[in-house]
């Protein structure tokens, strides 16, 4: 029906029980412009290797679910237009019809779990969109965290979202939200969203133990680790909020809906900040990859 197509590097690491970090591909195809998307994807993979873990970028290419991409596959995906954005709902249909698509947080978690990978690094997860009380726009990422046992390292939900409602939904579904190094809940481009994180654990090994403990207790689902953007790279909340409001207004004016909302807002914000939002995004993804590699190494030593 389907098989996992593992890159030689990932197949070797998994077969020998070495630490692996999953990476998504929607951030490459829909989250960042070319060529920064492919440059970032490569830099993030290299960073994970330098920490002693193996990167596994996940995507569907011509009906095959790839766990780890070769350099050529990564280049082709990053340079392609009209690649589908695949969430939980789309993944199987894309594979069955021989399609090509990039995986979101939700579908990357599914693929990582199928491959036996326990930790995954991204930029920011999806969440409850502003105005969700009328649009019902809630990212599938939240429900995936509630059911699939993968630890996801992000810099928070993107601040284009309704952060209090996002935390409420996570709480309702029993998802541990763990801040690292601070009590505040980070807001992607800035370190302090003004909300408090439900949990805080600073030690990567303890984060791995918390996942093991959940599994041992038979509790379904993953963990969301929220890792604040490095201080030197953040864009202050006062600067970002008006830009976000303007982007939201443009999306509403143009009737942007469903899966197109997040890429539209990110692109609008990129242009409105003269690229500063992208520089921050790259820095936070790299920071998350480093932490995810340390958690992967700790999982290795807990067994
Ligand atoms: N992190 C980033 N940029 C992104 C994403 C994450 O720094 O573009 C992607 C992830 O794939 C995430 C998606 O799953 O944004 C959220 O999309 P939506 O709000 O449509 O669920």
Image: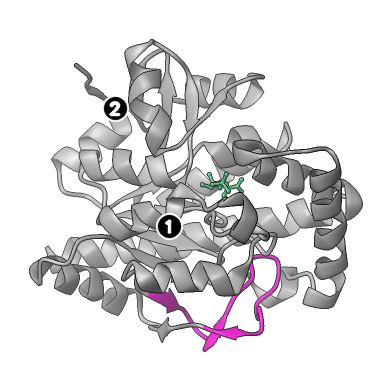
Label 1: state its secondary structure. Answer: helix
Q: Report the quarter where the C terminus lies.
A: bottom left
**Residue 44 in the image: x percent, y percent?**
53, 48
Could one spot residue 63 in this view of the protein? yes
Residue placed under numbered mark 2 in the picture: 8
**Residue 253 in the image: x percent, y percent?**
86, 43
Q: Reply above or below: 259 against 144.
A: above
Q: Mark 1 Cα within 10 Å, few/some/many (few <14, many 20+)?
A: many
Q: Is residue 115 magenta?
A: no
Q: Is residue 179 magenta?
A: yes
Q: Which residues are magenta?
A: 177-196
Residue placed under numbered mark 1 in the picture: 142
Q: Earlier in the sequence, mark 2 or mark 1?
A: 2
Q: Rounded to the nearest whole Å, what is the CA distance between mark 2 and mark 1?
A: 31 Å
**Residue 7 in the image: x percent, y percent?**
32, 27
Q: Reply above or below: 239 against 19.
A: below
Which residue sits at x=85%, y=53%? 249
Which residue sits at x=54%, y=24%? 84
Q: Main secondary structure of the magenta part?
A: loop
Which residue sits at x=62%, y=50%? 135
The answer to which quarter of the image holds residue 260 is: top right
Left or right: 101 as drawn, with respect to 259: left
Which residue sits at x=88%, y=46%? 271
Disc 1 CB within 8 Å of nearest ligand 1 atom: no
The answer to which quarter of the image holds residue 293 is: bottom left
**Residue 234 in the image: x percent, y percent?**
73, 70
Which residue is nearer to you in this view: 55 or 81? 81
């Amino acid at each position: 029906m389907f098989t996992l197509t593992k890159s030689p590097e990932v197949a070797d690491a998994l077969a020998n029980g070495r630490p692996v970090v999953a990476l998504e591909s929607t951030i490459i195809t829909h989250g960042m412009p070319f060529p920064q998307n492919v440059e970032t994807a490569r830099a993030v993979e290299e960073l994970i290797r330098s920490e002693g873990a193996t990167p596994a970028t996940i995507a569907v290419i011509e009906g095959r679910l790839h766990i780890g991409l070769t350099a050529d596959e990564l280049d082709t995906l990053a340079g392609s237009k009209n690649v589908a954005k695949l969430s939980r709902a789309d993944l199987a249909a894309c594979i069955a019809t021989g399609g090509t698509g990039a995986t979101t947080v939700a579908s990357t978690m599914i693929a990582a779990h199928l491959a036996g990978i326990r930790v995954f690094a991204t930029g920011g997860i999806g969440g409850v969109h502003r105005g969700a009380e009328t649009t019902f726009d809630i990212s599938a990422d939240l429900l995936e965290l509630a059911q699939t046992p993968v630890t996801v390292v992000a810099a928070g939900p993107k601040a284009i979202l309704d952060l209090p409602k996002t935390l409420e939904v996570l709480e309702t579904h029993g998802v541990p939200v763990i801040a690292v190094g601070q009590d505040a809940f980070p807001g992607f481009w800035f370190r302090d969203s003004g909300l408090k994180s439900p949990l805080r654990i600073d030690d990567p090994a303890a984060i791995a133990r918390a996942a093991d403990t959940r599994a041992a207790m038979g509790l379904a689902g993953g963990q969301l680790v929220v890792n604040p953007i490095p201080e030197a790279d953040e864009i202050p909340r006062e600067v970002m909020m008006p830009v976000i409001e303007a982007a939201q207004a443009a999306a509403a004016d143009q009737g942007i809906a469903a899966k197109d909302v997040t890429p539209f807002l990110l692109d609008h914000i990129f242009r409105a900040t003269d690229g500063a939002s992208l520089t921050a995004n790259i820095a936070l993804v790299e920071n998350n990859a480093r932490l995810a590699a340390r958690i992967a190494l700790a999982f290795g030593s807990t067994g």
